[in-house]
Amino acid sequence: MSVKLTIIQQMEQIAREHGKILAPLKEDLVLADCGLDSLGFAVLVARLEDKLGVDPFTAAEDAFFPVTLGDFMKVYEHGGR
Amino acid sequence: MAGVDAPSLRDSIANAPASRFFWDRAASAPYTDLDRGTSLGDRLADLAGRSVLIATASQLTTALALIELDAIARRLVILPPDAEAEHLRAVIAEAGIDAVVDDGAPPNAAMELPVHIACTPLIVPTTESRPAGVRTEWVLMTSGTTGVPKMVVHDLAGLTAAMQVRSPADGAAVWGTFYDIRRYGGLQIFLRAVHGGASLVLSSAGEPVADHLARLAEHGVTHLSGTPSQWRRALMSPAIQIIAPRYVRLSGEIADQAILDSLRAAFPQAAIGHAYASTEAGVGFDVNDGLAGFPAAYIGATRNGVEMKVLDGSLRLRSRGAASGYVGGGPALAGADGFVDTGDMIEQRGERCYFTGRKGGIINIGGLKVHPEEIEAVINRHPQVRMSLVRPKRNPVTGSVVVADVVLKSEPQGTGARQIEVRDDILKFCREALPRHKVPAAISFVSALNVAVTGKLLRRRG
């Protein structure tokens, strides 16, 4: 399964679990508007580490967080920045 | 400190019937031999009035040395089995130790002490008269975090303050403990057995659970004690079926409803009780109604000489059973009002109080506080779960999330799909019982969880 598809599936799963409604998951979607709150994102990062074997944010030396869904997916596709 | 002097341990075993023993895997020691004999090579006079390090490797020789040296030594410093060698020199200096009792080679740091005495399970008749009795300080080491362990000072009257007046029926009991008697919880069981004139089955280092259970059965154990983690591990052994205790006791960790129910199912005829005690604050209370937590009416009341209150969410106790302090001073153990803060956090729901976890063990999830123990209690209620460990995991968004390691009662059959099904079901279970931030972000299945020598689930600092 592609990284992008994994991310989308996990976001949909977490939205279901947390009772949230997701905006259409397009690459230019601003993450802050996607429908998941910070706890949802925290769980997403933890689940993706389980699925993909990497947490690119905690592994990174300086703090950063992508703005759009497309940026977020790129971070995972490159296993880091 | 006021209080009636307890009879010495030697007095407690005097005139015991010939059928009373201490047993471990390798040896047995009859009370009657110890009453008239010595396991210390008849060298009590050399230990009288000294500060003695009990550095025995086996619990049996520990038991024998404690009985002989109570009311003889000025101070008994009991070295726990998991004590770190690097701290021993500091312990010896701090506690003014000038003699060591061991059952093999003494630890390196104790080599230079002026008196070395070997303790053996072979008891020989004594020829010397007993030195005059003194009030012995009993010193226990706290488990806990890193650094030199704290040495907590008790006396026998305090250690036995919670025990009822001895009745003849007590002597017919056969006690067993999963706990090590060199820790407060296990020492309570050792003292209960001796105080009541009852036999005691001890475990040996490295003994498999099934072998220990087989010995408990062989000796007809009637009263058996351990931590919830130790009981969960015992319940995973098919050998659990061969013991039939009349009294099952849990303490040392939070007893959740799942473990109480599992023990009820395993031992339908037994009385099942969970007890609360801490090395510093002493014995708190027993709960015998089969339910987790304890009645809220205990708070603010005095029961069996123990006063309880809750301040800033944590349980405080005041009783004769509390330690008198730490060796070498250290921080005050009790507050100005005489209450000792146990550091165990309490939450009241209806007419019942529940332990939620340790003061220092809180996980912070984006500002929301979580005790791992409250999540474990929910996971452990799932019918397929034997035990679980909830721990923090670093997270770039909220600082931490919680994740869980879970031991199932039986391995999930077949494929990974079956595993995912069980995992999703546990998560669903958690979502129904817990607010969102307390639901584990991930669940891993593991074949076992590490239980420390203290009998408690090993928690790494996250």
Image (cartoon, coloured by chain):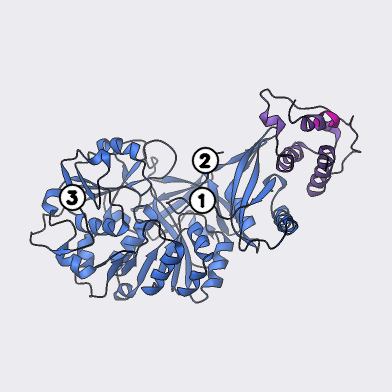
Query: From this viewpoint, is residue B220 visible?
Result: no
Q: Is residue B344 above or below residue B211?
A: above
Q: Nearer the viewer, mark 2 or mark 1?
A: 1
Looking at the rendering, which quadrant does residue A34 occupy?
A: top right
Q: Which chain is purple?
A: A
Q: Nearer the viewer, mark 2 or mark 3?
A: 3
Name the amino acid, label 3.
Ile
Three-letter residue code for mark 1: Asn
Give the camera-side residue of A4 and B381: A4
Instruction: Give the residue at the far top of this rendering.
Output: A62
Label drawn at residue B360: 2
Q: Which one is in front, B389 or B49? A: B389
**What range is drawn magenta here?**
A68-72
Q: In the rendered view, does B248 fall on the left or right side of B165?
A: right
Magenta span: predominant SS is helix
Q: Which mark is residue B130?
A: none
Q: Which mark is residue B117?
A: 3
Q: Residue B156 location, x and y as percent?
A: 27, 55
Of mark 2 and mark 3, the one earlier in the sequence is: 3
For this rendering, which residue is in front, A81 or B256? A81
Residues at discs 2 and 1 in contact (Cβ within 8 Å): no
* Mark with earlier residue (2, 1): 2
Which chain wears blue?
A: B
Gap in Å between the C-alphas at discs 2 and 3? Answer: 40 Å
Q: Residues within 10 Å of mark 3 (few under 14, many from 20)?
A: many
In the displayed structure image, the side of residue A65 where residue B66 appears, left or right: left
Is label 3 in contact with label 1 (beta carbons under 8 Å)?
Answer: no
For label 2, the crowd category at 10 Å Cα-Cα, with few meaning under 14, some 14 to 19 and many 20 or more, is: few
Q: Which residue is mark 1?
A: B450
